[in-house]
Image: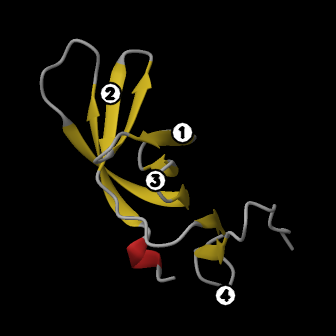
Amino acid sequence: MNESKLKTIVKYRAKGNKTFKDYDAIVTGAVKGQYIIVEIEGMIGQFSLEWDSFMYVADLFGNTVTCDYKVTRDFTAKKVSENSNQPTVVVKRKQSGKPISQQ
């Protein structure tokens, strides 16, 4: 899978605000129709967004995060250090829910 297919835009609304703010994000894991795991640029950590019949949604301490991302196949991804000669993101396809060995 190409790294550009992992990039998406996440809409974030802070508690008490009426407007959403867009952030760039990278999808690091996905299971079609259940959840996606995103790493949002400018925020520390990864966030899990659950499927809500038409888009992925999460409620983090009253803050709303939404994402419209189309999952074609279940996958996991991990970042590789940018100083190596490898691509910055490595993607592996999930198979039948078994854990993928990380080598």
Callout 4, which amino acid? Asn
Q: Which mark is residue 85?
A: 4
Work out whether mark 3 precedes mark 1 in sequence or the reverse, and give the earlier one.
3
* Mark in the foreground, 3 or 2: 3
Q: Which residue is mark 2?
A: 64
Numbered disc 1: secondary structure: loop
Q: Which residue is mark 3?
A: 33
Work out whether mark 3 precedes mark 2 in sequence or the reverse, and give the earlier one.
3
Q: Furthest residue to the top?
A: 16
Work out how far the residue at label 3 is from the one at label 1, CA to CA, in angstroms.
25 Å
Work out how far the residue at label 4 is from the one at label 1, CA to CA, in angstroms.
25 Å
Work out whether mark 4 precedes mark 1 in sequence or the reverse, and give the earlier one.
1
* Mark in the foreground, 4 or 3: 3
Residue drawn 42% across and 50% down?
41
Numbered disc 4: secondary structure: loop
Q: Which mark is residue 44?
A: 1
Residue drawn 13% across and 28% down?
19
Numbered disc 3: secondary structure: loop
Q: How many marks?
A: 4
Q: 1 above or below 18?
A: below
Numbered disc 2: secondary structure: strand
Work out how far the residue at label 4 is from the one at label 2, CA to CA, in angstroms.
37 Å
Categorize mark 4 by other alpha carbons within 10 Å: few (<14), some (14-19), many (20+): few
Callout 3, which amino acid? Gly
Q: 7 above or below 61?
A: below
Callout 1, which amino acid? Ile
Q: Residue 70 in the image: x percent, y percent?
A: 35, 64
